[in-house]
Image (cartoon, helix red, strand yellow):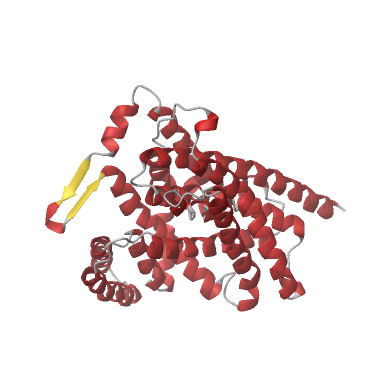
Amino acid sequence: MKFLRSERYAAFLLLGAAILGVALANSALGPALQGLRDQRLPVPWLGLNLSIGHWVTDGLLAIFFFLAAIELKHELTSGELNSARKALVPTIAAVGGVIVPAAIFLLMVPDPELANGWPIPTATDIAFALGALALVGRALPTRIRALLLALAVIDDLIAILIIAFFFTDDLRPLPLLAAVPVVLLFGWLSRRVRSAPTVVILIVLGLTAWVLVYLSGIHATIAGVALGLIMVGKSAGRTRHALEPWSNGIILPVFAFVAALVVLPAVGISELSPVFWAIIVALPIGKLIGITGGALVANRLASKRHRFPLGDILAVAALGGIGFTVSLLMNELAYENQEEVAVEGTLAILIASVLAAVIGVTLTAIRARHYRSIDAA
C-alpha cells in the first residue's frame, strides 16, 4: 500500500484510468460498459435511485472531498495557510486562477445555454498536480510544493462553494437541517475515538449525513466536505492516513475511468462545440495567466520572506492548469442534460490537462535544473 501514497504513482494511475476509459468506450466493449455505468442501483427505503455512475460521482467522490477537507483544515490550522502572511500569495493566486479561466470561457462561449460550464476550467487537481511536480521537481525547495499544495487546496475550496451555490437546483431544507446535528455529532464523537464501536458509529453517522445531504438536493460531495472540516486533529490525521491509499488507488482512478467512458464525437474539428475550444484554452492558458498574475500582485503586497521568484510561480501556475478530477465533475454537473456537449467537454478536459501537465513538467524541470546548478555552485 505504500506506493499508493506516492504522488507520482497516484498521478500515473489517474491518467492511466482515464486513457483506459476512453479506449474501452471506443472499442467493441463500449456500449456494454456505458450500459453498466447507467445501470440503476436503487435503495428505495432511503429514497435513493442512483445509477452506478452516480454512485461513483456522488458517493465515492465524497470520500475524496472528505480527505481534501481534512487537508484543508490542517493547512489552515498548522500548515501553509495558518497565518495571513503565509496565505496571501496562494490565496490571491488561486482567485486569479479562477477568475481568468472563467472569463476566457464566457468570452468564448457567449451562448447562454452553454455558458453554465464556466466553472469547468477553474479547478486544479491536487493529486495530479502534485504527482507531476514530484515527477521532476525533487531538486526544488519545499516551499514550492507548499505553494502548489496551498493553491490547489484553496482552489478546491472555491470549487466546493461553486458546486454548493451554482449546481443546486431543487433545495429541500428539511433533510439539510436534519444533516446539521448529524455532522455536529460526528465532530463531537471524533474527539472520543477509543474503540472499534466508536469507529463504526462514526461511519454510520457519516453515511447518514451523506444520505441527508443528497436528499436535500445539494450535491452529496458537500457532506464529505462538512465531515472533513469538523473532524478533529488526531482522528482526522489517522483517518486520512488510512484512507489515502484507497483514494489514490481506487476512488480517483474509478472516477476517472467512469468519467472518461465517452465515445469520440464523429465530427470534424470545425464542428466541435465552442465549449470544447473554451476549455482547451481556458484550462492550461487561463490558469497559467490567472495564477501568475495573482501571484505577482500578491508578491507586491507580501513581505520579502513570503515572496516567490517568477520562474517558480510560472511552474506552479502551469501545473495548476491540470483540472482533471474536479473539472470532470463540474463538466458532468453543468451539462448533465446535454450529452453531446458533456462528451466534448470531457475530451477537452483530458486534452487540456495533459497539455497543462506537459507545460508544467517542462517548466518544473527547468527550475529544478536551475536549483541544482545553484547547489553545485
Q: Tell me what residue is drawn at x 54 percent, y 46 percent.
A: 279
Q: Is residue 168 above or below residue 8?
A: below
Nearer to the camera, 293 or 360: 293
Residue 109 in view of the camera: yes
Instruction: Return the x and y of residue 66 as percentages of the image width and height.
Output: 39, 61
Q: Residue furthest top?
A: 28
Where residue 30 sits, quadrant-wise, is top left
Q: Tell me which residue sits at (25%, 74%) in the image.
A: 177
**Would you say 83 lies left or right of 52 here?**
right
Which is nearer the eye, 281 or 90? 281
Write the residue at 57% across / 75% down: 82
Where does the image place residue 368, in percent across and percent down from the top left? 74, 49
How many numbered marks does the figure carry?
0
> Seen in the image, is 351 located left or right of residue 36?
right
- Residue farthest along the left direction in this orientation: 45
**In this picture, is 238 found above or below 44?**
below
